Amino acid sequence: MAVIETVNLTKVYGHAETAVTALDHVNMVMQAGEFVAVMGPSGCGKSTLLHLIGGLDRPTEGCVRLEGRDTSRLSDTQLTELRRRKLGFVFQFFNLMPVLSALDNAALPLLLDGARPEHARAKAAEWLHRMGLGARLSHRPRELSGGQQQRVALARALVAEPLVILADEPTGNLDTRASDEVVGLLRQIADEAGRSVLMVTHDPRLAAYADRIAFLKDGRIVDETRLSGDRDAEAQVTREKVAAL
Ligand SMILES: Nc1ncnc2c1ncn2[C@@H]1O[C@H](COP(=O)(O)OP(=O)(O)O)[C@@H](O)[C@H]1O
Ligand SMILES: [Mg+2]
């Protein structure tokens, strides 16, 4: 069964003359363990797509199914719970709590969900180790590099063992090397843990880590390409496609 399915997913912001159709009947399916990159020009609806799939906003028309369940039928409380348990978010600006240590930042979703603090911290430590941050548990975000902060955010996104990771330009503030580390970790998570990853990126080189690229334009999916695994060749083809959008 598909982990995520969008059915005619549509989002219109505003009304009448000021109405903007950010997403226009998008149908897409993601399987468990699949890593999908979303590309397209600024304003084409990439963030809106992630917000709707993530239950941060509700569609104007159509629906999102998570493990076959229509999320638009859920109450706000149920949606919040689903978000906390099934979805992990990673953003361009790492959105870490400045006063908390790396460990407590990563443990936060479990703590908010009422887990025992020892259990939450043990889980967080496990993920931080996997992210290569075993020696940074008590550091505050400002004591970490951008790449390290994003890896803390990744540990936080994974700590509740979600089905799906939604990453909106997660490397937008990182240099090339840190970007490769973060996207390499997303690739690993999809491969080893069987989680689905949906990542927005502008960089064809990073999109080439995915299994598939969905190209968005004016709120519609205009092309979906399955990748061969030859990352250099795929990046080149993708560069040409992006330029032609
Ligand atoms: N909260 C909002 N209110 C009104 N318009 C919005 C809102 N969020 C996004 N939009 C508009 O919807 C379109 C898609 O935006 P977005 O999904 O952020 O694009 P992308 O992430 O691809 O740059 C843009 O035209 C944007 O201006
Ligand atoms: Mg965006």
Image (cartoon, helix red, strand yellow):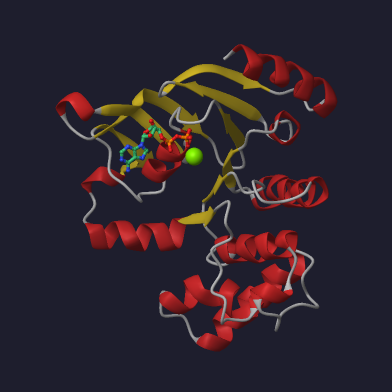
Q: Position of residue 139 (x, y in %)?
A: 71, 80
Residue 204: give x, y in percent of width and height.
71, 29
Q: Quadrant of the C terminus?
A: top right
Residue 48 location (% of width, % of height): 40, 38
Query: Residue 95: x percent and y percent?
Result: 54, 63
Can residue 67 be spotted in the picture? no
Decide which of 226, 93 is in the foreground and name it: 93
Side of 84 where 120 appears, left or right? right
How many numbered marks have been drawn onto this rendered protein structure? 0
- Residue ID at (55%, 26%): 40
Relative to 199, is 12 on the left or the right?
A: left
For residue 96, above or below residue 138? above
Residue sitting at 67 percent across and 47 percent down?
171
Q: Residue furthest left?
A: 16
Name the residue at 68% across, 65% down. Answer: 149
Q: Give the left or right position of residue 45, taking residue 16 as reference.
A: right
Residue 28 falls in image quadrant: top left
Vertical placement of 112 versus 202: above or below? below
The residue sitting at 45% across, 42% down in the picture is 50
Residue extending furthest front? Answer: 17
Q: Quadrant of residue 85?
A: bottom left
138 shown above or below 60: below
